[in-house]
Amino acid sequence: MSVIARWCLRRRLLVVVLWLVVLAGTSAAALVAGSAYSNDYDVPGTESGRAQALVAEAFPGGDGDVDTVVWHRADGDVSGGDTEQRMTETLREIAGLPGVAGVDGPYDERGADRISADGHTAYATVTYDNPVQDVAKGDIAEVVDTARATAGDGLEVQVGGPGAAKLQAPEVHYTEAVGVVVAAIVLFLAFGSLAAMALPIATALVSVGTAYAGIGLLGHVMTVADFAPMLGMLVGLGVGIDYALFIVTRHRRGLREGLPVGEAAERAVATSGRAVVFAGVTVCIALLGMLVLRLSFLNGVAIAASLTVMLTVLASVTLLPALLGVIGMKALSRRERRALVEHGPRPTLPHGLAARWAGFVERRPKLLGALAAGFMVLLALPIFALHLGTSDQGNHPASSTTRQAYDLLADGFGPGFNGPLTLVAETESAGDRLAFEKLPEELRDVPGVAGVDASALGDGKGDTSVITVVPETSPQSQETSELVDRLRAEVLPAAEAGTSLDVYVGGITASYDDFAEVIVGKLPLFAGVVIGLGCLLLLVAFRSIGIPLKAAAMNIVAVAASFGVVVAVFQWGWGSEALGLGGAGPIEPFLPVVMISVLFGLSMDYQVFLVSRMYEEWLATRDNRRAVRIGLAETSRVINSAAIIMIAVFGAFVLGGDRIIAMFGIGLAVAVALDAFVLRTLLVPALMHLLGGANWWLPGWLEKRLPRIGIEGPLPVAEPEPVPVPEPH
């Protein structure tokens, strides 16, 4: 690390220019190539996946997405009169707009079922000539504006579907700026120097900007979800600013101790920089643990987020030292530079609130540890009500046209109308065809079924028949999931008896339920790999059995508590409408996997920075009480500052209005807050005080076989003799 730091310092301008060239080149390439994201939740081999494949084979050519124009008149009938005339003209106008392949309305012989039973609500489907991601926003906006312009005189018109939802996504993201501004304020308060404050921000922005463009290019060679760039930015800004903060803090310490700028920067990279690399590796290992699930949808997310973290680490140990060389002594505030000139270099000692808190924890470890553990358990309780499923446009903010269209359809045609189930079967023999044709009558008597459409025969190769089942409940409802299970376990096996018929249940709810089932089934393997590799790294680094076991336990506690908060906010709806995130709904199936990966990685960061200082003191004194007290006193301030920055960055993403990103933002912000302010500065040191020397125990036979990895490595120069921290009274 010293060699890298020295090279970057001597060629600082070249390093800065190279990073800017890479950023500009990657951004230009991404702009030219465009985006190619895909939210393909299908899992090969599942029943819903088989149903979708059969439908696609039987009904080819249905590549275009569909929006729904819904109109409602509370004081009259939508059939006949002025309403029918106005909407007929509007639908004719929409059919002629660019990007529209066709419009099917209610005012013809085939459209009678598009008018509600009470006559107050009707709808039409607008089919685009391509998937929504390939349709220009201007074309979609023209469809929505044309439809909604018809409203008035008691007629309400709304538009739902993927096209209308695309328009509601913010064109310009301001959330990142909010997080960066808060981070800048915290850094300035911590450093007292504008130049020092700017370095972590600049390093993070350059590395994350490069990664954001790189993820766009990655989408052309593998499946990458559309939320992956925002997730990468969310994680990258948090860890990027934090990693730079740790290095700059160590650099400033060297300057205050009288080291020249070059030596101080070299020592910072050789010590804290090594810890940053170690922490970054643990984050990437946790993220890449998603690859063991063998799901293409999550593979892209894992690689995209890991790419971002790797680039932030690389920037922290190359671009940052170059910038430290550029600003020179301005890394210190004017007051610090003046004190250095007047009084000379002085060793940095823990003092103030951090030292007093470390002594307080040492005096009352049992009480404080019990309070912290009880608080974490209380926050984790909602996870027992966790319901994995799909949130839909019924969870959009109440003011959005997609949410209002969803509600109008639910009121007029029933909640299940927004997410019908599809029963698909190959009916090649006469017996199979006869058995399938009897199904609609049997299905109408099944509890939870609101309506059944007669079977349709596909036009593709082979004989494929389809029945549409409308549930009584919404797509995201637990009752709809139970209906899917009832059809698969009881109703359909009875209908298939004595025939060669195989009926598959598809549709939105079935697809998400299958996806969730696959993930939950593989979750133990995934968690075992992530926890095991993390513990192995800590075992090698700290030569202790207790340290990695405590780290694993703390990480599990942090994940459980943060998920408890996510369930309360998003599934129970505690404050989600107030935050502009729509109503209560289930938790996305992939959220546990992604959040466990990110949270385990971030928790390891703080564990490394806290325990590495304790370990250093333990090796020097073999006094566990002193090691824990000194380590906590010297690192708690920087850990807390880093946590505040991460909380600000993660929390700011909630303001964007995207439900999935908001789930990540709230979950990660809560986890970091709990990890920094409850676990690492309270519960972990309390447990270490209670365990005493057992914290550092390692069997002799294992000690001989483990490789040696020094997290902070040897110092390039001798450090000043440490001054003892006063014992607590």
Image (spheres, rainbow, N blue to C red):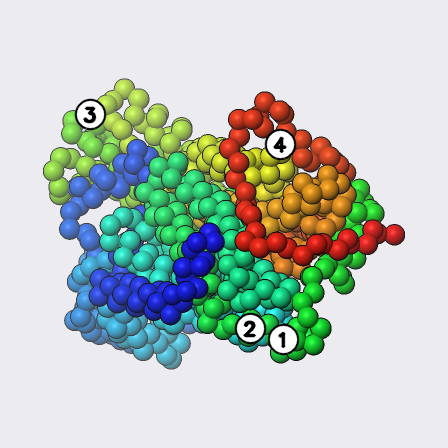
Q: Secondary structure at mark 3?
A: helix
Disc assigned to residue 329: 2
Q: Tag 3: residue type?
A: Gly
Q: Residues within 10 Å of mark 3 (few under 14, many from 20)?
A: some
Q: Examine the rendering and report whether any part of residue 2 can be seen.
A: yes
Q: Is residue 375 left or right of residue 639?
A: right
Q: Residue 297: x, y in percent?
A: 34, 45
Q: Tag 4: residue type?
A: Ile
Q: Is residue 149 above or below residue 692?
A: below
Q: Residue 523: x, y in percent?
A: 47, 36
Which-is-in-front pick, marks 4 and 3?
Answer: 4
Q: Are marks 3 and 2 in contact (CB under 8 Å)?
A: no
| Residue 405 figure quarter | bottom left
**Number of dots carrying numbers:** 4
Q: Examine the rendering and report whether any part of residue 65 can be seen.
A: no
| Residue 172 figure quarter | bottom left
Q: Mark 1 or mark 3, which has the lower sequence index?
A: 1
